[in-house]
Amino acid sequence: MKILSINLWFDKYGHKTLAQLKAFRSFGFETYAATVIEEDKTLKCEIYKVDDDITTVASDVIEREAFGAAYFGAFRYLFDYAAENDFDIIYMRRLMSKIMYAGPHFKHLKDHCRIVYEIPTFPFDVPSNKLYALRDKMEMFAYRRVRKHISVTSCCLYQHGRPDDDWLLFENGIDISNYTVHEAPPLDSDSCVITMLMIANMQSWHRSERILHAMKDYKGPHKLKLIVASPKSREYSQMQELAGSIGLADMIDFNGFLQISEINRIAEGCHLAVGQLSGSEYGVMETHAIKHKDYCGLGLPMFSTCTDTSFPDDYPYYYFLRDTDADIDLDHIIRWYEDIRKNHPGYRREMYEYAQEKLQYNGYVQDILDRLQSGTSAF
């Protein structure tokens, strides 16, 4: 059996896609990935075979057109490739507004293979940015038009509940082989620098800037350092400007996008991790953030203003800031971390083992296959 995973933002979410495909490989699937790369005047469609290495097996270049119309051709190319090469499953990560261009091709694709559509963040919680809100509404309008052609919709949900019992609730999963267990870095005096890691794909509703205000307000004895790994965006630039304006520029390393292998190396020298900091005014009260699973695999205790159902309420290495709109008290969080080092000296190994057992994607693959099988006797 063969699966093709289509992820238009492969550069940002590649390690997640590869974790999913490795899980499908463990079930005997021949696995492929596809993406669309925007260049100056063209769209470049790339299809890769994912084995021990990633090999480009097909590509096409499509001239850009007004209003994104070239995406009609991009999806036609990807879907035709899938039909002509006898794929059993097409697994699409959320297309957002691009689903408008893919929609006309869904019926043709359905005649050749089963379609799984993943929505990692369900757009019930309207973001403050009106453009994002409009994009979400466009996506769900188009989704309702093509829903009859989709075999399984897998979805991470927030507090509004499941909108459709036919949807398969899932959480993001990782590939534990991406992470290494390191010894915790020293923290043997008040003069030590506490180093925090923040992996982010910054959007306005993520409220990443809250960590900067917390660092500015910190009154404890330690020096602080923040390492940011995030694709560049408007919010990324705004955070850089804010760091300079409040006098924190020397305390923060802005790295842009980093591969998970580089993050794994950096994490060896980190103490804490900054989780999702969305405030309740944005409606985001629960999360299944992939970065929280990254942190767990890296052995970094984390703090967040959102409940993460990947972790039980008594999980000792996830600090839940219950008052989501209050200032973040780093003095208290660092004391919490110091207690972890004292009471759980093997915490990094424990976190890694939890991620290995609970946070990989394999269990969700089984759920998807079960749902596909229940929908048809042919699969």
Image (cartoon, rainbow, N blue to C red):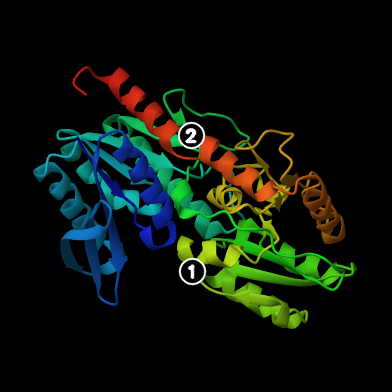
The residue carrying mark 2 is 170
Query: Based on the displayed image, in which of its 4 quarters is residue 372 positioned?
Result: top left
Q: Earlier in the sequence, mark 1 or mark 2?
A: 2
Give the residue number, with chain letter if any, for mark 1: 257
Q: Quadrant of the N terminus?
A: top left
Question: Quarter-wise, where is residue 26 in the image?
Answer: top left
Label 2 residue SS: loop
Residue 189, given in percent of the width and then of the height, sits at: 85, 68
Instruction: Look at the picture and state if 346 lies above or below 362.
Output: below
Q: Nearer the viewer, residue 120 or 50?
A: 50
Cβ atoms at labels 1 and 2 below 8 Å apart: no
Q: Please state if 195 lies on the left or on the right of 58 as rendered.
A: right
Q: How packed is label 2: few (under 14 Cα within 10 Å), some, or many (20 or more)? A: many
Left or right of 164 on screen, residue 200:
right
Question: Residue at image x 46%, y 54%?
Answer: 178
Residue 287, image x, y percentages: 61, 43
